Amino acid sequence: MSEERVSSSPPARQPGVRIAGDHHAPHPAMSHAVGELSDGEASGVSFRAAVLATMARYCRGGRVDVADHREVRSYDVDIDSSLSALLTLAATPGEPVPGTAEASVALLPVGTAPVTDAAIRVHTDGRQYVTTSPARLHGQVAVRHFSQAVRTFLDVFAAADGETLDRLPVAAVGILSADDTGAELALGRGEFLPQTEEQVHRTVVRLAAEVPDRPAIEDGDTRLTYRDLGIAVLATRDRMRAAGLAGRGTVAVAMERGAGSAVAQLAAFASECRVVLVDPALPAARIAYMLRDSEAGLVAVASDDDGVARTAASLGIAVLTPSPTPGVPDTHRTAAGLLEAAVSLPELSEDAVSHIAYTSGSTGAPKAVQLRHGPMRNTAAALGDACGLSSSSRGSWFCPPGVGMVEVDMFPVLAAGGTVVVAPPSISTDPTAVRTWLTDRSITHTLQTTAVAEQLLTMEWPAAPALVSMRVAGEKQRVWPTPDCPFQVLNVYGSTEANVVAVCDLTQLVRAGAGRSDLSPPIGRPVRNVNMYVLDEELRPMPRHSVGELCVSGRGLSRGYLHQDAANAERFLPNPIPEDDFPVLYRSGDLAWMDSTGLVNVIGRLDDEVKVAGYRVHPGAVEGQLSTIPGVAACAVVAAALGEGGSYLIAYVERASGPRGASLTGTGIREELERLLPAYMIPSTVRFLRLPLTRNGKVDRAALRDADTGRGGLDTEYRAPSSDAERLLVHLFTEILGRSLVGADDHFFELGGSSLSAAALVRKATDALGVELTMVDLMEAPTAARLARRIPAG
């Protein structure tokens, strides 16, 4: 996406009321929740009034979606006659305003019978107050917010002195009235600062002249000073030019992280070339696809005879082996010569591509994201400010080859003039080994993937470690640091497509008393030169506390996908947001909400939503609650398909060290979750294991799903059925639950059974066996062996 202004016309905006919680909305997850706002704020009152007015005009017992800070839930709205009459009166011009009102509203989970304890009673008699009886299944926050909306509506209407809602200054969902400032909308704008920082390849060569003996890279036995690094970069640049590659050329860097990879990337920038990040461990066919797709003109490899070099040769692409200690002209070895070279290095445009990073391609061919030098420089400055990177910093390099996270990991340390210490590949996903290495090497700043960081935060640390700051990136962060955590923990949110979007100092929040065990940590506020918005399905701003899609504009965005016009058109759009000068809006696909202080919280993905027992569930919302249970070091929740359709949830838990972790049981975890979540969100199975990680340090969810097609997720020892009745019932368990290996002693509900699948089992077993079985029988005897004993002999 170019920085040139994209011509577009924003959506038409008319004052008035827009339907909230419309069950005809294109994407029901884009719900319109009621925020807990101060009654003294006009836009907040207007919003609540709009919600109730909408119900009066349109819902009439329809459906509304509410967010309770954990997830989005759908409810049927049952308006009793007194409130319905009151709302109708409010929308009728010329009718008198009642002085007193009494009404109740029932929120009913969609598709179920009424639940009486969801009633909300509202009384207004000049001393407005609310009495609620929140249902545990619905969530207290959701009910409290809705009751607040009812009360506020009555307050506003009673104070309107005969005005109807058509005449009130309404700022409804996504619609701005003429005099609305939008103060309560989910709009977050980072500080706008000019890009004055030096580009990193120029910084490295300049420091080679100014501080030649300062350590730049420590890679095992290899130690490079800034003078060594600067000389190696210039020599490798000259070799690239001699190979005919300069100015908009493409260099593939297919090397493990280390000094050679750093030299190759910096030399490519000095040659005005873009870098294709290639993991040398990938299959040859995948590497060949990436080299062809990116039109690489040169491949930097560790050895002329390694697999990548042979793949490149088969495609007719030249290879180069960067050396950290090359022979170079004498002019490059003197301080004056290095300083002159630094001044002569190109200043690359903000829009020039820095890296091309390929996505995983789990749903087809991998897409190549084109990162830019502008966002790279903006990220280095933002992270440098947030965690205090300086020339004395010793920053680790953990991110694997082939991923754009290198712009968040190694490059900010070099940009600050610090020392990059390369972590050995053998320790990357072992939290205990990582802690030992960080301590032994006196690392002051580190970037860790979420899966590893969440375990590091549960470990014991020295009282005064060298570690000053830990940046956490890669997946949604679910674990808060403890108040006595001896280093700063920064939640870094972004993506390959948008680089770093937000940073949140979790340590500071915890010490200020803002860390909440019932909420996952927020992703924070936008960094410099970046804007974040929570928008509805029509790209209109949502009110704060409402759940919508997180969208981003600013200097953090990539140029989009290489050779992927359709994907670019879907994700990178002409920016429709008023008063935003950045031309492109990126749709992240994350579901998020913004609180009253401007902190943004991500609750899941639009594309990971599953249906469990007829309800919409985001596994990430379950993980957020599961991670709050003492003794849980790490967790993942995946959905598995039932044989007769639908899904059930499986929770994978890695125990923390110590007595709390050792005492965890599946039953105990399920009981704890029952206090926090509705019944349909409780995982059917809890399995304890060490979570498998991908090479990129993320939880390998595909491996977890594969593990549960047979005996995965079960703690019982397999026993084959021993009678005809057991064999028939095991066959039905297998057919209905989609399992390939079910034993006679396996628990139906721990296998993933639900009330719907239980009804199907009882029906099929009754028909096949010719005896009357009931749901009570299955509840009391939930294994094939125990249920078979309830079948009369003969």
Image (spheres, rainbow, N blue to C red):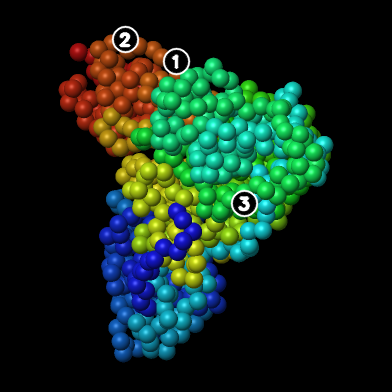
* Distance CA(mark 3)–CA(mark 1): 65 Å
Question: Measured from the top left, where is residue 634 in percent x and y?
Answer: 57, 34
Label 1 residue SS: loop
Residue type (three-letter) at the residue carrying disc 3: Glu
Q: Which of 621/503 is in front?
A: 503
Please tell me whether mark 1 or mark 2 is closer to you in this view: 1
Pick the front one: 491 or 480: 491
- Residue beneath disc 3: 347
Q: Are marks 2 and 3 in contact (CB under 8 Å)?
A: no
Q: Amino acid at mark 2?
A: Ser
Rendering quarter of residue 78:
bottom left
The residue where tag 2 is placed is: 722
Q: Residue at x 37, y 74 (%)?
A: 13
Which residue is drawn at the image coordinates 42% and 45% (left, top)? 561
Say whether residue 435 is visible: no
- Looking at numbered disc 1 in the image, what kind of residue is underneath it? Glu
Q: CA distance from mark 2 to mark 3?
A: 77 Å
Drawn side of residue 202 relative to residue 524, left or right: right
* Mark 3 residue element: loop
